[in-house]
Amino acid sequence: MARVAVVHNTLDLRGGADAVCLHACEALSQDHDVTLLTLSHPPLSTLDDLFDTDTRGVRVETPTVGRVSERLFAAVPPDQVGPQLPFWSLLLQRSLRRRRGEFDLVVSTANEFAVPGPSVQYVHYPQFRRHVDDEGSVADRLWSRLAVSEGVPSDARLLANSSYTARAVERRYGREPTVLHPPVDPIEGETAWADREDGVVVLGRLAPDKRTLAALSVVDRVRERGHDLSVHVVGTAAPAYREYAQRVESAVADRPHATLHGAVSRDRLEELLTSTKYGLSAKPGEHFGMAVAEFVAAGMVAFAPDSGGQRDVLDGDPERLYDSPADAAATIAAAVDRGDRPRLRRDRFARDRFHDRLRAIVETALPAAARRRHTT
């Protein structure tokens, strides 16, 4: 049994990266002594309920700096959380370096870290420069200089959540990571395809970058082509995006065929996904595209911009990817005209695939002495 440290800057966001962290902890704790190092987190039992994971065998430790940073994190405006994450990673990286000798292997589920010794690093997108093709903001350059001045260690095994992210990592660090898509289990429902609602689900937070209003406009264009589609908007807005959320609320109220569900329980979400035919993402350049992956897992016909990790999720299908709002409307209308049904397997991103591959990768990354200890 090897001593493995899983590092994750904060688990308070409860998003796709946090799901990867919890699944990594569950997968690795079956064979190893796992310690989760994070600066801020709700009770793991709460996250287990959210992500349907089991991390009861995982020890959780918050470095001393985390006790202060957790209070500071809570005070950060929601629209500033993303830009702050590299700073949290920097704090955790400095703390981890002091304890590196306690662990045989470090597994980061919060992007790249410059830590000595063997490691496996799962990158959702390079964190120390928001835009890897330019110089970035002053803060981006500062975090980059402080955190990765030594570069990612040569013995680090790099993983990426999509081929899109893998290319960004290669541009940033000159090394090509292995693509390991996040875990998204099949969502089973009893509604036969013919009995599903002729509707579109738009899933995700209500924010300008998600382009919720653009998605509503796309459905309008499809309806103008003679297809009587409903639209369901599922998601809530952080206080910083309240004005945008109000615009979404007004737009929905103006459309008799539209419903704003807001925040819903997991059971209600799965019921909605498995009883509706189509799913639509309007945000280009998603690093992976968890909402689109959930559409696929629920047996929906999903549509997304022809960019980012969503191309992986939809297997590069030109009849599911689009270049503009007008193209989106034409693409959806054509699929409705043909009577298209789902083509992708619901289980293509299932947890067992993720768990098994991660355990195999960790096994090869362990130092020889730890591997011998693990097998005896």
Image (spheres, helix red, strand yellow):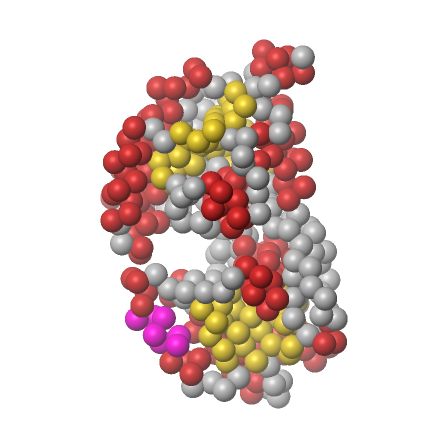
Q: Name the spot of residue 327 as percent of width and height, x first.
A: 56, 73
Q: Name the spot of residue 354 as percent of width and height, x first.
A: 63, 40
Question: The N terminus appears in which quarter of the rendering?
Answer: top right
Residue located at (56% from left, 19% from top): 2
User: With 222 as the anchor, is 127 left or right in this view?
Assistant: left
User: With 117 as the anchor, is 85 left or right in this view?
Assistant: left
Residue located at (67% from left, 41% from top): 352
Give the camera-side residue of 285 and 17: 17
Image-quadrant location for residue 190: bottom right
User: With 334 as the anchor, is 2 left or right in this view?
Assistant: left
| 257 versus 266 height, above or below | below
Residue 154 appearing in the image? yes
Residue located at (29% from left, 52% from top): 80
Question: The C terminus appears in which quarter of the rendering?
Answer: top right
Q: Name the spot of residue 163 as percent of width and height, x first.
A: 57, 46
Residue 214 appearing in the image? no
Q: Total of numbered circles in the picture?
A: 0
Give the camera-side residue of 217 and 167: 217
| 113 versus 310 height, above or below | above
| 156 versus 41 height, above or below | above
Please check the rendered image and state whether residue 246 is part of the magenta-colored stretch, yes or no: yes
Q: Which stretch is magenta? A: 243-249
Image-quadrant location for residue 33: top right
Q: Name the spot of residue 8 as percent of width and height, x first.
A: 43, 36
Residue located at (31% from left, 68% from top): 242
Q: Please name the predominant secondary structure of the magenta segment in the image.
A: helix
Please check the rendered image and state whether residue 244 is part of the magenta-colored stretch, yes or no: yes
